[in-house]
Image (cartoon, helix red, strand yellow):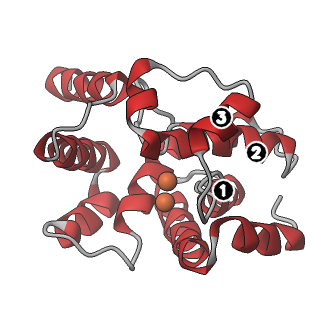
Amino acid sequence: MIKDWFYDKLKSDIGEGRYNHSLRVMETSKDLALRYGCSVEKAELAGLLHDCGKFQGDINLLKVAADFDIILDSVMEKNVQLVHSLIGAVLAEREYGIEDKEVIDAIRYHTTGREHMSLLDKIIYIADLIEPGRDFPGVEELRKLAYEDIDSCMLEALDHTIEYVIQRKMLIHLDSVKARNQLLIQKNIE
Ligand SMILES: [Fe+2]
Ligand SMILES: [Fe+2]
């Protein structure tokens, strides 16, 4: 359950801009949860906290991860933007007292996706990408698709992210590849 103090802590940890993004992700997650029959309570909680590990200011996330005994794989080590989701999952548990594994996993996998994502995982991943503050070519199509077919939207969202990563010559996380392969295989079987 969301406690009142979550909002204040989150705002001071991640800064106003990301805090406002988090509120929009929370709203979009709620809308998607209502559309697909997912728990609204879990969707709002995971949506609000999904970026709780994205500390503002000059903080070395690799050091924070080490302090939390988080073991990073080789892609995470080279792609620090991904690390905030792992830190977020630990913070959600230790500092916000979240015990629900589904909520913690949705936070953990909101940057990479994973094979066999839960409905909540998909909702948070997609809400993060399509919340009303986002503006990039194709976002309107994704917004529409999100309410029509969540798996097709998830596939498009992964394509979008992987293309972004390729264009910037960054490493692709294997969980994203596995998530995409599994969704594609599932689609071709249906
Ligand atoms: Fe994030
Ligand atoms: Fe986010």
Q: Nearer the viewer, residue 35 or 84?
A: 84
Ligand 1 closer than 8 Å to the CB at disc 2? no
The quarter holding residue 33 reads: bottom right
Which mark is nearer the camera, 3 or 1? Answer: 3
Helix, strand, or loop for circle 3?
Answer: helix
The quadrant in which the C terminus is found is: top left
Q: Is residue 127 above or below residue 116?
A: below
Left of 63 or right of it: where is 21?
Answer: left
Disc 3 to disc 1: CB gap under 8 Å = no
The quarter holding residue 126 reads: bottom left
Kindly identify the amino acid type of the residue bearing the numbered disc 3: Ala
Distance in Å between CA atoms under marks 1 and 2: 7 Å
The quarter holding residue 145 reads: bottom left
The structure residue drawn at horizontal position 39% and vertical position 79%, both measured from the top left corner, is 133
Q: Where in the figure is residue 16, as x and y percent of width and height? A: 61, 80
- N-terminal of the pair, mark 1 or mark 2, is 1
Q: Where in the figure is residue 156, as x and y percent of width and height? A: 20, 48
Residue at the disc numbered 3 = 65
Disc 1 to disc 2: CB gap under 8 Å = yes
Q: Where in the figure is residue 26, as x and y percent of width and height? A: 58, 67
The structure residue drawn at horizontal position 23% and vertical position 23%, both measured from the top left corner, is 181
The structure residue drawn at horizontal position 61% and vertical position 65%, both measured from the top left corner, is 56
The structure residue drawn at horizontal position 68% and vertical position 40%, both measured from the top left corner, is 64
Within 10 Å of disc 2 (Cα), the crowding (few <14, some 14-19, many 20+) is some
Residue at the disc numbered 1 = 52
Kindly identify the amino acid type of the residue bearing the numbered disc 1: Cys
The quadrant in which the N terminus is found is: bottom right
Left of 119 or right of it: where is 13?
Answer: right
Q: Nearer the viewer, residue 40 or 169?
A: 169
Residue at the disc numbered 2 = 91
